[in-house]
Image (cartoon, grey):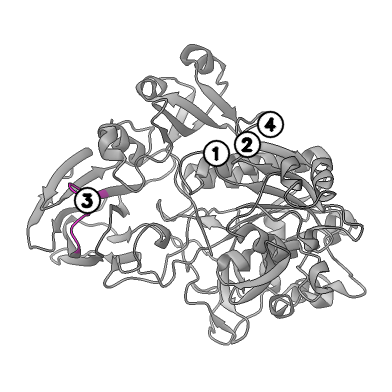
Amino acid sequence: MNSGIVDNQLNLALDVPESVRERTLDLDVGFQPETNTWELIVKYSGSLDRIRQELNIGVVELSGGYAIITIPENLIDILTGYEEIIFIEKPKRLFYEVNEGRLASCINPVQQAPYSLFGEGVLIAVIDSGIDYSHPDFRNDDGTTRIAALWDQTIPGSPPQGFRIGTLYTREQINEALQLPMPQRLDVVPSTDLSGHGTHVAGIAAGNGRASSGLYRGVASSSELLIVKLGESVGSSFPRTTQLMEALEFAVQYAISVGKPLAVNISFGNNYGSHSGRSILESFIDDISNMGRTGIVIGTGNEGAEGNHAQGILQMGSVEIVDFTISNFEFSLNLQIWKNYYDHFDITIVAPNGVRVGPIPSILGTQQFQVAQTEILLYYGKPTPYNAQQEIYIEFIPTNRYINSGVWRIELVPRQIVVGNYDMWLPTGGVKSPATRFLLSSEYTTLTIPSTAFRAISVGAYNAFTGSYAPFSGRGFTRDQGIKPDIVAPGVNINSCAPGGGYSRRSGTSMAAPFVTGSAALLMEWGIIQGNDPYMYGEKLKAYLIDGARPLRIETVYPNRTLGYGALCLENTFRNMSL
């Protein structure tokens, strides 16, 4: 398929048989083989009623002209012909971006007189792996829950109104479950957090410290929690971007319905895209940030030291060589090349055995090659209505069991160069061996998507014990030099809630983001709930957090690629507001 309103990965997926897709890392994400249907993201104008009726497809409409559709594969080409459809994007997998922090972030002073802010009246949405709802830190002094609602997308049954997956558990149901011992309480609310990631994140943002007599209290300890456990009841163990979009829609609409300001925490991301904030997911985040009284906080990911990014600038008369190693026992791998559409160069792929494939013609669409035990799919994409940049997508698939290991090479030979900058990304570390990486990698522009969304508050991590940046933290800037991260927060050895009622230490930008989410809730309490500033949300919220950011001694120029505008310091934010 070669449609200009369909994203490149979906075009390629529809060009190859299902037997090939299922051997790749990402081409089958969103496909349901039992029903031969795809779950897709669409941007549309007007109404979807005609399409829904004529094609008889499943539709979940989101705000701002976005929707999640479920459609038979043989109808996708027909769908592209409807004038209501602006663009179609395939879902992508999301990966986790896996007290001292409160002190380092200057939060303690604003929880004393005259401010005494603890997030009262503000809703914090944690979109993650779920929560241990019985943990004492998520319960009031009388034992009742602090969770307003819990949508577990992985348990089929009774989804929220307007959605088609999962089960929504109310405050009343959670309180009913809490009156029962284990395991009987799981008969009422069977939602759990197996990884503990969501529980840890929620504890940093809003835990009240009851299990530690207040020692490990989170930032906004009086806020209500809105929990969404991402995923599905069958299939992939990784959640998808479609499920994240539905979670955001649910959270914002819920907050509007109860009349409360909302701080959203997202600690998921992936590497697929131009890293310039121009995917449909990021466009949706930008649009929904303008709804209600909302602030969306996203961790920048843990790709800083993973070796999954390479970049350079092409010059006429010079061949650019990019080497990367593929570890033993890799089932499949993909690689993206992003460039300016008006820059033109030839590509040659050199296998570990020295066999050369190329120069590969710059033909829009899918091309297939085979080297030893590895099949190579290459797709030259077009610019899209959302992105003027061009993607060249390369998929490595084994013809037997594993793709050929060793050092592979990509040669770029310029033919016409206007600007010349290019970027390459491998998948995030969660789906491949750490030894599979670029030999000369760049630690910059390693932000995961969707932290590159323009209106998101993008948060990197630093080590509050040493005052240095965390090597794993995703760094900026975006591919088109947009300033990200916006801010950094403590993300190394953070102690927070663990399933079972105790605490554990974890590191990652997943741990840094909720410090900022909780701080956003405190600002919203001061501004909206206490009446000091009824417009304390969205970009204004981001501006105040940035204004209070403090420098770390490791950098002298701000903003910069590593720390953005600096480290979270809520006391500075309030001090500057009084000037």
Answer with mark 2 or mark 4, whichever residue precedes in sequence: 4
Q: What element carries label 3?
A: loop
Disc 3 target residue: 401
Q: Quadrant of the C terminus?
A: bottom right
Depth check, mark 1 against mark 2: the one in front is 1
Q: Horizontally, is 204 left or right of 331 in the view?
A: right
What x and y, as percent, mark residue 568?
67, 73
Look at label 2 and name its amino acid.
Gly
Numbered badge on residue 166: 2
Is residue 396 one of those drawn in magenta? yes
Disc 4 target residue: 158
Vertical side of 443 occupied by 525: above or below: above
The residues colored magenta run 394-405
Look at label 1 and name its amino acid.
Ser
Answer with mark 1 or mark 2, whichever residue precedes in sequence: 2
Is residue 444 one of those drawn in magenta? no
Disc 1 target residue: 233
Residue at the image point whose x is 41% and y is 45% from the top: 387
Q: In which quarter of the image is the N terminus?
A: top left
